Image (tube, rainbow, N blue to C red):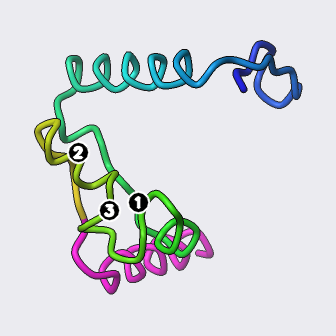
Amino acid sequence: MKRVGKRGEGKFVRISWQEALDTLADRLKSVVAQYGNEAVYINYSSGIVGGNITRSSPSASPVARLMNCYGGSLNQYGNLQYCADCLRHALHLRQ
């Protein structure tokens, strides 16, 4: 599905898988060309770690392998720092 209205309006049109993949590839190429591979980050969270695309090991997932073949992306190792950063920001916002 492709959004055709403003964000939040719920207006979409059905597109082919080929158009969807072409759109994703074009956007990825554009971001990397403008900002470099450091602008691409795959966030591993409970919503995707066990998914079909990511399998159970994010570092061995098809998405991670694609990014490796593409020239790399930002990565995270473990989740302690990620969780600590979220907590730090949340505590800062409470003050």
Amino acid type, residue under disc 2 in the picture: Met
> Which residue is found at the position 81% from the left and 21% from the top?
12
Residue pointed to by mark 3: 61
> Few, some or many C-alpha atoms within 10 Å of disc 3 (few <14, some 14-19, many ≥20)?
some
> Which residue is found at the position 48% from the left and 71% from the top?
45
N-term-proximal mark, 2 vs 1: 1
CB-based contact (under 8 Å), mark 3 and mark 1: no
Residue pointed to by mark 2: 67
Q: Secondary structure at mark 2?
A: helix
Mark 3 or 1: the one toward you: 3
Magenta residues (range):
76-95
Q: Which of 18 and 73 lies nearest the eye of the viewer? A: 18
Q: Quadrant of residue 47?
A: bottom right
Q: Quadrant of residue 94?
A: bottom right
The span from disc 2 to disc 3 (Cα, nearest Å) is: 10 Å
Amino acid type, residue under disc 3 in the picture: Ser
Q: Which of 73 and 49 lies nearest the eye of the viewer? A: 49
